[in-house]
Image: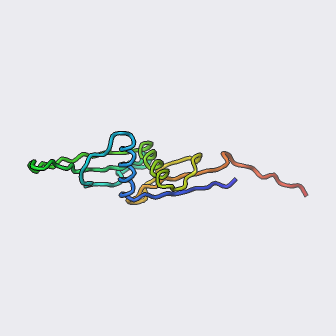
Amino acid sequence: MPTEIRHILFTSGEVVEAAALFSQQRGQPLPSGTVTEAAPLETVAGDAIGFRISVELDRPEGKEKDTRVRSFEFVGADLAAILIMYCKRRNIPMPMKGAKSLQRFGSKIGLIVSMNSGGDEVLERTKP
């Protein structure tokens, strides 16, 4: 049976939105503030794909300027879970039984889903 491979690419903004939705659903929302960094982590071959979000926290009114930045890194299975949940929430079609992996495509994160019959089939030759 042929193998189907689907690539779903996410921009940095979509990964931030997905992380915010996921964190909120888990009861630990990202802090209020301005996103100052949203980018895939640099990796070497064989490393898990990751993504960093840095947020400059909102300051209460009347407080002196003290910039506080919190960074969040989502790596491997955690990042995949975030993107899968985002696809479900946005009705992006994705086979649930397919093998899922992550790949970096420049500044985008790709969720790759592959499906096949589970094994190679050998065709029998007919005798003349």
The front one of 122 and 118 is: 118
Q: How is this picture coloured?
A: rainbow
Res. 10 image quadrant: bottom left
What residue is rendered at 24% in x and 54% in y? Answer: 34
The front one of 98 and 43 is: 98
* Residue extending farthest front: 61
Q: Is residue 123 left or right of residue 115?
A: right
| Residue 47, visible in the rendered structure | no
What residue is rendered at 40% in x and 51% in y? Answer: 18
The front one of 59 and 71 is: 59
What residue is rendered at 32% in x and 44% in y? Answer: 29
Q: Position of residue 60 (x, y in %)?
A: 15, 47
* Residue extending farthest right: 128
Res. 47 image quadrant: top left
In the figure, 13 relative to 72: above or below? Answer: below
How many numbered marks, from 0 up?
Answer: 0
| Residue 10, visible in the rendered structure | yes
- Image quarter in which the C terminus is found: bottom right
What residue is rendered at 58% in x and 48% in y? Answer: 98
Q: Position of residue 127 (x, y in %)?
A: 89, 55
Q: Is residue 26 left or right of residue 115?
A: left
Q: Position of residue 25 (x, y in %)?
A: 39, 43
